[in-house]
């Protein structure tokens, strides 16, 4: 038996795979990447050496009103490390500056006060102005143009009224935007629901270029770059993290150039060669990304890239927050099956995209050719079954179910952290 540690919620599980079944363990090299500097030193070095930009301190010197976009509760950005450094540097250069922290919720629910404390620490929450972006509040957004795709670009007024707009985030493979980070803090981060839905239309999601690790010719990325430029996103700090959510590298500077350099670094670490298998085990990297089924689709796409057609994907994800989106749930659960979802969604026009359409489209794509067993003891099994997946309370139970479907000699590939790899 081969023992493998995989993340689950805020802990790790040790699973066992029979040696004669196991064909590969696909892991990002980020998890074994060794650094000698502290997280703070890595971040500070990046800020001292910005890419394609003046230093942050020089940018803020004469600015009265700065807006700092940050990620929400669903993203493992180590803001307890990054935010104090950013705030300190900004105020050291300009003590009188007004700073607003704008949480880029995208299409997600607002971040709660407790989640803010967990993310930033109590001191920042108690002493800083922190505002949630609410994508469906059309009084809080302003139209600033038309996306290359033709969709209307509506962005948060607070961001657009800033004298200087900067952002923090992290870079990892993203299952349809290519990579997270950079321009994503604007679109979908602080965009209106209408804009997010136009950008995430079924046509673009179905594109062969809307895949993990791909930004060239990616229509979704193209829209996002345009949105960031229209918002005048002047400076970014993006970090790269390991499986323990610790910073192993950081990139700061111009919102496009620094992001590109960061993506290159991540690609070197994250790219793994597909090893086809009958059964593929994946996760969503543990907390905070495995809080719901919606987010867990990301880890499933990594498994999809290396699972044989008709194979079984064992997705180990806590999903303690439920399905993660009512429209997402309804459109899967109320359909006769995944093929019916795909047939319907591919007929939906760009400007008629419905909430969560991109997520249920991708899940339906996976379910159309694979059996998915969701492993969790923190989520309602009935909900999972209604969404055309199978449920297992333990990994051992899931593996037994998978063997019953594919046979005792089935070959198994394990991806301990599905959101950290680009499977080629």
Image (cartoon, rainbow, N blue to C red):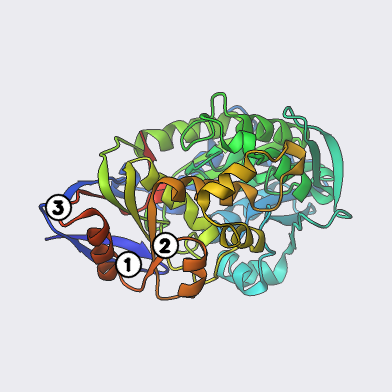
> Looking at the image, can residue 55 be seen?
no
Decide which of 386, 200 is in the foreground and name it: 386
Q: Nearer the viewer, mark 3 or mark 2?
A: 3
> Looking at the image, can residue 391 be seen?
yes
Picture quadrant where residue 28 is located? top left
Circle 3 packing at 10 Å, graded few (<14), some (14-19), many (20+), is few
Q: What residue appears at the point 54 percent right and 29 percent down from the top-left corner?
A: 215
Q: CA distance from mark 3 to mark 1?
A: 27 Å
Residue located beneath label 1 in the image: 12
Give x and y (percent) for residue 417. 36, 53
Q: CA distance from mark 2 to mark 1?
A: 8 Å
- Label ID, residue 409: 3
Residue located beneath label 2 in the image: 286
**Going from the N terminus, do you reach mark 3 or mark 1 first?**
1
Q: What residue appears at the point 49 percent right and 74 percent down from the top-left corner?
A: 382
Circle 2 packing at 10 Å, graded few (<14), some (14-19), many (20+), is many
Left or right position of 354 against 323: right
Left or right position of 52 against 242: right
């Amino acid at each position: 038996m081969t023992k493998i540690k995989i993340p689950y919620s805020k802990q790790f599980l040790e699973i066992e795979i029979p040696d004669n079944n196991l064909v590969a363990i696909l892991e990002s090299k980020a998890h074994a990447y060794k650094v000698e500097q502290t997280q703070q030193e890595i971040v500070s070095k990046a800020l001292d050496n910005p890419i394609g930009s003046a230093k942050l301190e020089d940018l803020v010197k004469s600015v009265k009103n700065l807006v700092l976009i940050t990620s929400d509760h669903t993203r493992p950005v180590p803001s307890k490390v990054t935010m104090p450094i950013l705030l300190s540097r900004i105020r050291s250069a300009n003590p009188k500056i007004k700073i607003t922290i704008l949480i880029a919720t995208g299409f997600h629910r607002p971040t709660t006060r407790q989640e803010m404390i967990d993310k930033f620490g109590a001191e920042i929450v108690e002493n800083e102005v922190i505002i949630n972006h609410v994508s469906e509040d059309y009084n809080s957004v302003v139209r600033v143009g038309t996306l290359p795709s033709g969709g209307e670009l509506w962005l948060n007024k607070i961001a657009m009224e800033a004298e200087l707009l900067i952002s923090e985030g992290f870079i990892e493979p993203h299952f349809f935007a290519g990579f997270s980070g950079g321009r994503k803090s604007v679109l979908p981060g602080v965009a209106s629901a209408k804009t997010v839905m136009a950008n995430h239309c079924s046509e673009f999601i179905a594109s062969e270029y809307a895949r993990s690790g791909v930004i060239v010719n990616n229509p979704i990325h193209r829209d996002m770059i345009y949105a960031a430029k229209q918002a005048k996103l002047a400076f970014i700090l993006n970090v790269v993290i390991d499986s323990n959510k610790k910073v192993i590298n950081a990139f700061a500077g111009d919102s496009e150039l620094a992001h590109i350099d960061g993506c290159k670094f991540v690609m070197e670490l994250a790219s793994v060669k597909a090893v086809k298998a009958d059964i593929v085990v994946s996760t969503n990297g543990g907390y905070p990304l495995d809080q719901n089924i919606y987010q867990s689709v990301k880890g499933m796409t990594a498994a999809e890239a290396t699972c044989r057609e008709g194979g079984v994907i064992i997705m180990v994800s806590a999903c303690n927050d439920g399905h993660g989106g009512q429209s997402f749930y309804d459109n899967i659960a109320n359909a006769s099956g995944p093929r019916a979802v795909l047939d319907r969604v591919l007929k939906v026009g760009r400007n008629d995209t419905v909430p969560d359409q991109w997520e249920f489209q991708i899940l339906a794509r996976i379910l159309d050719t694979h059996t998915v067993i969701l492993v969790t003891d923190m989520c309602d099994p009935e909900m999972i079954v209604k969404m055309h997946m199978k449920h297992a309370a333990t990994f051992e139970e899931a593996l037994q179910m998978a063997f019953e479907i594919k046979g005792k000699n089935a070959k198994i590939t394990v991806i301990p952290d599905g959101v950290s790899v680009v499977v080629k």
